[in-house]
Image (cartoon, grey):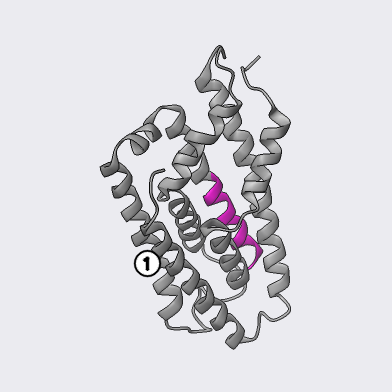
Amino acid sequence: MLGTHDLLLFVLSGLLLNISPGPDTAYIVGRSTQLGWKTGLTAALGIGTGVLVHVTAAALGITALLAASATAFNVVKLLGVLYLLYIGTRMLFGRWNDNRKEKSIGILSTTSLARVFLQGLMTNVLNPKVALFFLAFLPQFIDSDAPSKIAAFVVLGAIFDLNGTLWNILIAWVSARAATMVRNVGQFRRWIDRALGTLFIYLGIRLAFAQRG
């Protein structure tokens, strides 16, 4: 009725793509390991919201601008690179204080959770390769004679986002549970910060060399 086809293949393909590690996974693992399950869940929801932004942009044709315009693509890419480098540098070189409220294990302030949500959102939104992925991937499962291609696109995007968010929530839970065994070891948590900071810097550098094709 919606003009989609091969829905099972779409779901399976989406799941395989979702389990591939990237900046989103790194961010969720990092926040879950550092600050626990609630923070990891918040990060996953922020990333899921970022995916909805990409789906909406692609459905409205905004993403096509990134594919057609080298300037638009490079501007978004530059913002994404700077953001990843910013997060990575802070995690890698930031001073550690076990008494800091944000690093404490327990209840985080609403402001802290809002910041985690926003960082997850921006990590996803400022990656133009994600936008181009939706533009290239979703139309393959939409009939050429679909009554509303936009509606079909949004439905497929929502399915992809839901499956991805559930997977990310699982990652957050597993990471938080694993971290509880060594959570009180400050040296371990410092090394987690450094490792993830290095990873984000690497991902930022890799994004800097990404091409539209």
Question: In x, y percent, where is residue 201?
Answer: 42, 69
Q: Residue at x 52, y 43 (%)?
A: 51
Q: Residue at x 45, y 55 (%)?
A: 123
Total numbered labels: 1
The span picked out in magenta is 36-48
Q: Judge by depth and name the residue closer to the eye, 92 or 72.
A: 72
Question: In x, y percent, where is residue 170?
Answer: 70, 56
Q: SS of the residue at dot 1?
A: helix
In the rendered image, the vertical position of residue 177 relative to residue 194, given as above or below = above
Which residue reaches farthest left?
Answer: 71
Q: Residue at x 62, y 47 (%)?
A: 17
Q: Main secondary structure of the magenta part?
A: helix
In the rendered image, residue 94 lying in the magenta stretch gets the answer no
Occupied quadrant, residue 209: bottom left
Occupied quadrant, residue 147: top right
Mark 1 neighbour class, 10 Å CA radius: few under 14, some 14 to 19, many 20 or more: some
In the rendered image, the vertical position of residue 101 relative to residue 66, given as above or below = below
Is 75 situated left or right of 4 in this image? left
In the rendered image, the vertical position of residue 15 relative to residue 37, given as above or below = above
Question: In x, y percent, where is residue 82?
Answer: 34, 61
Which quadrant is home to the N terminus? top right
Question: In x, y percent, where is residue 174?
Answer: 72, 64
Which quadrant is home to the C terminus? top left
Which amino acid type is marked by label 1? Tyr
Q: Judge by depth and name the residue closer to the eye, 28 or 69.
A: 69
- Residue at the disc numbered 1: 86
Q: Residue at x 69, y 26 (%)?
A: 6
Occupied quadrant, residue 89: bottom left
